[in-house]
């Protein structure tokens, strides 16, 4: 598995990471979680990204691979209520502080590699208190690095603070705003870049408009974009390799709760970047038809 530098942190991360939301929300058998994660680690995975609000995702990870903690980088996100949370509003400094401590315990580790603010808005960012909680956690040795997870103008505002080591943002064939909006800032500041939704939720596989807001925006966009490759068996491969063609992404996090799926995706990623003409064709089509409201999706 290819490794890329994670900004200026000194960490070299697997270009294909693992996003752990589905092992919380899909409620898989714990045995499947253990097979999935251990198989992926054996195949070259070294980035696991989760969050306090992904139900029991952190606990499941801790149970499954806590004994292999020195083999991978562990990222989590804070900001929202979680099952054991105190009765405080999202983004309250005390909620954030307790969330970090809860994540350390659930993930069976003494120190996280990255703690990220989980898609907070402009008002929270400008107040500065939320970011300061993460800065204090870094100084206290609870996390090695801190980052922001989000999109659009909020991501720009977060990076203006100058305190973060990384950005996690949406970037894919149906979501290209970040290429011009935030990737220049990532390069300028030497940040690690985590790409979420790198296969656009595979929204093209749905024959009818998705009912949930999670899938629907990308489904709608892809009807307009009408990429010819979406009808082929290599659509997922093309989507992954499109993101890999850009130099800024450090790791692409793809979620699953099915054993074997991560290694399948790793085989596709191993084919490397797209040929230049294929990449430019996807970019050109986006520039031709993208609407002004096709902003980054959190």
Image (cartoon, rainbow, N blue to C red):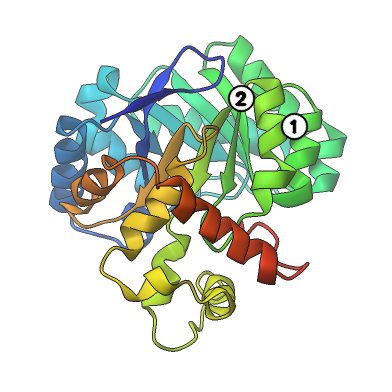
- Disc 2 crowd, CA 10 A, few/some/many (<14, 14-19, 20+): many
Instruction: Single out the residue that lies furthest toward the front.
Output: 277
Residue 48, placed above or below residue 24: above
Percent position of residue 55, x then y: 42, 53
Does residue 108 appear in this view? Answer: yes
Name which quarter of the figure residue 86 lies in.
Answer: top right
Q: Using the image, tell me which numbered label, if any, was put on residue 191.
A: 2
Q: Earlier in the sequence, mark 1 or mark 2?
A: 1
Residue at the spot 68% in from the left edge and 68% down from the top edge: 288
Q: Residue at x 52, y 77 (%)?
A: 212
Q: Which mark is residue 159?
A: 1
197 over 188 or under it: above or below: below
Residue 197 seen anywhere in this rendered image of the structure = no
Residue 14 or 94: which is nearer the viewer?
A: 14
Q: Find the distance from the CA under tag 1 to the CA under tag 2.
A: 10 Å
Callouts 1 and 2 close, C-beta under 8 Å: yes
Say which of 117 and 102 sits in front.
Answer: 117
The quadrant in which residue 72 appears is: top left
75 left or right of 150 in image: left
Q: Position of residue 110 (x, y in %)?
A: 40, 17
Q: Which mark is residue 266?
A: none
Residue 14 vs residue 288: left or right?
left
- Quarter of the figure with the N terminus: top left
Label 1 SS: helix
Residue 198 screen position, x and y as percent: 46, 52
Image point 21% across, 54% down: which residue?
261
SS of the residue at dot 2?
loop
């Amino acid at each position: 598995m290819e490794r890329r530098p994670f900004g200026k942190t000194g960490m070299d991360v697997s270009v294909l990471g693992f996003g752990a939301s589905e092992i919380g929300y899909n409620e898989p058998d714990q045995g499947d979680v253990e097979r999935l994660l251990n198989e992926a680690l054996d195949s070259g995975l070294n980035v696991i990204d989760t969050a306090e609000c992904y139900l029991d995702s952190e606990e499941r990870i801790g149970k499954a691979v806590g004994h292999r903690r020195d083999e991978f980088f562990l990222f989590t996100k804070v900001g929202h209520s979680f099952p054991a949370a105190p009765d405080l509003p999202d983004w309250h400094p005390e909620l954030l502080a307790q969330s970090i401590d809860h994540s350390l315990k659930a993930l069976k580790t003494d120190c996280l590699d990255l703690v990220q603010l989980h898609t907070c808005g402009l008002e929270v960012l400008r107040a500065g208190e939320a970011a300061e909680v993460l800065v204090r956690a870094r100084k206290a040795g609870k996390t090695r690095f801190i980052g922001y997870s989000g999109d659009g103008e909020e991501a720009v505002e977060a990076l203006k603070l100058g305190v973060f080591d990384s950005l996690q943002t949406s970037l894919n064939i149906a979501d290209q705003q970040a290429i011009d909006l935030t990737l220049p800032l990532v390069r300028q500041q030497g940040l690690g870049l985590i790409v979420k939704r790198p296969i656009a939720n595979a929204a093209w596989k749905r024959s009818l408009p998705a009912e949930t807001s999670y899938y629907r925006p990308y489904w709608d966009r892809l009807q307009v974009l009408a990429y010819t490759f979406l009808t082929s068996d290599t659509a997922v491969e093309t989507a992954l390799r499109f993101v890999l063609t850009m130099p800024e992404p450090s790791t692409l996090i793809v979620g699953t709760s099915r054993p074997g799926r991560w290694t399948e995706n790793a085989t596709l990623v191993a084919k490397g970047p797209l040929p230049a003409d294929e990449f430019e064709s996807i970019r050109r089509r986006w520039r031709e038809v993208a609407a002004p409201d096709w902003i980054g999706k959190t």
